[in-house]
Amino acid sequence: MSETKKTDAADAVVPQQAVAPEDRADSAKGSGDREVLLRVQGLKKHFPIRKGVLQRQVAAVKAVDGIDFEVRKGETLGVVGESGCGKSTMGRVITRLQDPTGGTIEFEGQDITSLSVGKMRPLRRDIQMIFQDPYGSLNPRHTIGSIVSAPFRLQGVAPEGGVKKEVQRLLELVGLSPEHYNRYPHEFSGGQRQRIGIARALALKPKLVVADEPVSALDVSIQAQVVNLMDDLQSELGLTYVIIAHDLSVVRHVSDRIAVMYLGKIVELADRTSLYEAPMHPYTKALMSAVPVPDPKRRGAKSERILLKGDVPSPIAPPSGCRFHTRCWKATEICKTTEPPLLELKPGQQVACHHPENAADQAPQDTVLLSAAREAVELVIPAQSSPQESEASKEASEPEAAEPVVAKAAAEEEAPAEAEAEAEGADDAAEAETEAEEGDASAETEAHEAEASADAEAAEVDASVEAETEAAEVDASVEAEAKSDAAEADRQESTDK
Amino acid sequence: MILLLVVSAVTFAIFFLLPRMAGQTADQLAQQYIGKSPSKADILAVKHNLGLDQPLYVQYWHFIKGIVAGATYDLGPTTAHCNAPCFGYSFKTHEAVWPQLTSRLPVTVSLAAGAAVMWLISGVAVGVVSALKPRSFFDRAFMGVALAGVSLPMFFTGNLAILLFTYQWPIFGRTYVPFTENPAQWANTLFPAWCSLALLYSAIYARLTRSGMLETMNEDFIRTARAKGLRERNVVVRHGLRAALTPIITVFGMDLGLLLGGALITETVFSLHGVGQYAVQAIDDNDLPPILGVTLLAAFFVVIANLLVDLLYAAADPRVRLS
Amino acid sequence: MTELSKTGAAVGEPVSAPSDAPSTFLEVRDLKVHFPTDDGLVKSVDGLSFSVEKGKTLSIVGESGSGKSVTSLAIMGLHRLGARGKNVQMSGEIWLDGQELVNADPDEVRKLRGREMAMIFQDPLSAMHPYYTIGSQIVEAYRVHHKVDKKTARKRAIEMLDRVGIPEPAKRADSYPHEFSGGMRQRAMIAMALVNNPELLIADEPTTALDVTVQAQILDLIRDLQKEFGSAVILITHDLGVVAEIADEVLVMYGGRCVERGAVDEIFEKPQHPYTWGLLGSMPRIDRETSDRLIPVKGQPPSLINVPSGCAFHPRCPYADLPKGDVTRTVRPELQLVGSGHYTACHLSQEDRTRIWTEEIAPKL
């Protein structure tokens, strides 16, 4: 197989790629037309691992390994991912608390990638950071007044009406009392300390605030207070946020656009509605399906849970090709060999995947599942088939459950055109919702591919397989944006509700 | 590898620095070697014989060669051969340094090892008990004693011990008997010295153990051990002490290494003819070769102890094991 | 005291005399755990009653300092151990399978720990001894309660590791905790807790330190194992998502006391206590988009040394002025039955609560 060539073809197929960022569809707050505040290109941060007497570099932890994104004025970009995906490192690199290994960071059009400490200093006013740990980030020996006024001293700024007055104003702004000026951090609770951290970050009226897990150390009720506070401050002061968090619920609440990171890469970047309603990257989907929903009625909806097997691989030696292929239930040969580029498959939704969900397959001809995927499929299926769920819960759940690609025929010699979808899994395999995609790569050239896709849907309750097969032939020269099957579009609609 | 580098660096530093710190020139050194009112020619001859007229790096080379391969001194009509680990001859007594060291080493080792066993056992025991009942009467009493132990200088407690146990109530012997001759007598004589030395160290160890235990007994894994239904004794020993001891091993290794290089004050106070006392004498006499020898020996022990501690630490704590 | 024992009775289980062995598997009656400190008496748990049946999961929900973790440690009898154990003041009754634990001989309780009741903790890395292999720690847990040789115990340990889904269990048994990933460590922790087939499993924030994908794995595992062993589970968490996922019953704690208790559907559909409303309103939702603001609980959690008089929640309660007079500030509300198996401790009248929930709170969630 010639996967590499195929990807190139897939590349060419995507028309939106050429579209300028300004023309992209607006996100919830219409930030599309706003000017770009921060632009990051090919950003890399590797931490060398040294060994021996001479401290030779033997390997590197590729914490951030080539990411591109931009943050527009006034918007909130959420960054999610599991621990070790590099999101915190990314935050520290874009604020230049750490130096990048490669790539460029542009702030207001100015390249700040390699500015010296001295040249960075004036920019520090505009870029501020809020940290996770409200206990560790405040010096216990300093009063609140001196902590919050530190930025003025360091930057040599004399605010109008004097430092003390300004600090007291800031304290009030974040919901603390001005009388707290002379108190020490240990006298405050976690939520109040985080407010102090926010006051300090806002002292110099920054343009960009990078918040690394700003609420994850706080109790639920306090977390909500701080989230609301950050919300209010954004609308009052016109702040731009980059919020790094592992809690997908919080990110959904606060963000306009969201970047999903996996092993140092952005796998999906989209506005929040698209991302949460119709995620394209299998990882995004798995990540979101794993979040427990505070609604016991939806417990039956466990059926839609995709259980990822095992742990995130080591960022020292990330998997070849698509980094998610070792855990992905859709992974095929091409995923192992070729890294998928981050493409805009839908206006405002970029994804790096060969076989995205909710979008046309980027490598339809490549159908042979990897062994990892075959195992993953088995995991997905039993997870789907938890018994005793009511019809109602089924309806309430997102229509696209896991779509395990169990293409039996594909594993054999590629029989063209006719799709044979077979839901085979462990015990209750028949209850799976199966979508099999198959390509015919026998004789034809890459430009003229036949894509056969079969969609088998099974009703869960009576355990009988009711397959509904639709085969659509798509000429590869016809743009990929054409939905491969109508059911897909239907689903899209129903989720948009 | 690193070990050898360190040792040679230390010897180098000693070799170059020591004579200068004593503020002596080669002439003065040579003069010492001869005796009173030497003639100019004698000095020159001695200087030449000892190689003191050569550049320092040559001298250093000879010194190192002496240690590794032995050295031959041409003393006018006769030649003196000094076997393999040759540290030269004392300026004062004209005795070879190395045999002196080896004959005195057993005394120092006896003193250090005995005291170490005592302080380790008593210090850790007191520390553990204090940690298990913090703020209790026992805890406060022992920590008070420990504080006194740290504060009281050796020449006070040592002399007090001698006064009480060898003069007032003469239950302990006065002269050192080698272990190989009469172990009972050996222990009997050394006991007051051990006690005095151990009092100082066990005080430090008790405090170390106490704080270490207080910390580990609050660890989550202690709670887990209890949740398993283990008896409290097992929780303390197998889980608590096991974790708290590791940092103590480090300190212990270093202390023991240092002591093996000679317990200067203790040996002097108790008139034990050990390495430390040898050093004190040499310092008194401005006698360079023994000082050099003792310092090098001490450095050697410290480095070895360091290495052992590292190995022990790796054995004790799987987290520091090299992958 | 009489007032308090009434609380116990009000909780619903038939109580004829305080020392009667209950029919339920685990029953806690009027549990109080107080810690004397230099600043004053910390009333971590102050009159808590509940029960759990075998095969059921009770979720204790609350914020930090609400007393939820202290409750679990009290059941295990873990407070009384260690240096500060002597000072802890504990009263009330804990009945486990017909045996009372609060006033029992400590060594009897120790024998139950790990065998009848086991616990898994929030941070599996610090909860495991760093110097011993995973296998040997499980072996130890098994041999405390079983007189078997090391070989048999090791076989059992490997069997358990296999059961909780650790690949190559025989090999991994010789690994140290730091060589495991977070998820694997928590699996090993679960294996260690279940090695003696305990009938009560207490999980204290078992997934808080884990990533969501791993959390899903662990919750699934706990659920499966519960089905398999039929044990009672107490799950302590602050995450209402986890509660909805796994619990049969929910107990909401605030300031060391239970403010609401009931079946999980009841609690999520018809919550009766303003604090429960606050928790629900504070949570951003993954399953729906809200541009609206969250509805946080105002103010700070109470100090357990100076618990507010009357209803402990009244300083933060937006409806504290609704009941007539200053009843909310002076009288501590007792748990009262508000639905089938659903209790709440609130001075608001039933009508007020229903009205506020259906008209004011529910539409905004």
Image (tube, coloured by chain):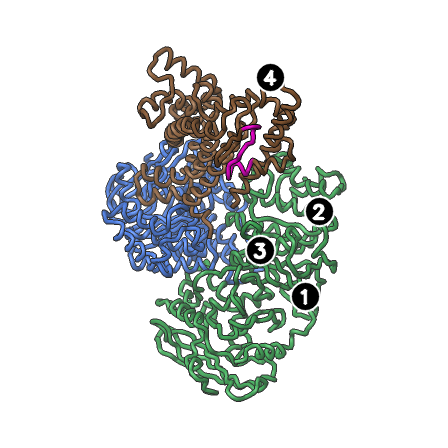
Chain colours: A green, B brown, C blue
Mark 3 or mark 2, which is nearer the start of the sequence?
3
- The structure residue drawn at horizontal position 39% and vertical position 53%, both measured from the top left corner, is C175
Q: Nearer the viewer, mark 1 or mark 3?
A: 3
Residue bearing mark 4? B36
Residue type beneath disc 4: Lys
Q: Is residue C41 magenta?
A: no
Question: Residue A57's mark?
Answer: 3
Would you name the residue on which mark 1 appears? A32
Q: Are marks 4 and 2 on the same chain?
A: no
> Which element carries disc 3, helix, strand or loop?
strand
Spatial CA span between label 4 and label 2: 80 Å
Q: Nearer the viewer, residue A433 or A419?
A: A419
User: Is disc 1 placed on a helix, strand or loop?
Assistant: helix
Say if the magenta span includes residue B74: yes
Query: Which is nearer the N-term, disc 1 or disc 3?
Result: 1
The one of A4 and A190 positioned closer to us in this rendering: A4
- Nearest to the eye among marks 1 and 2: give it: 2
Which residues lie in the magenta part?
B63-77
Residue B180 occupies quadrant: top left
Of residues A471 and A444, which is closer to you in this image?
Answer: A444
Please identify, in this view, whether the residue under mark 4 or under mark 1 is nearer the observer.
Answer: 4
Image x and y of residue A276, in percent: 54, 65
Locate residue C297 relative to residue B220 in the image: left or right. Answer: right
Nearest to N terminus: mark 1 or mark 2: 1
Instruction: Read off the residue under disc 2.
Output: A204
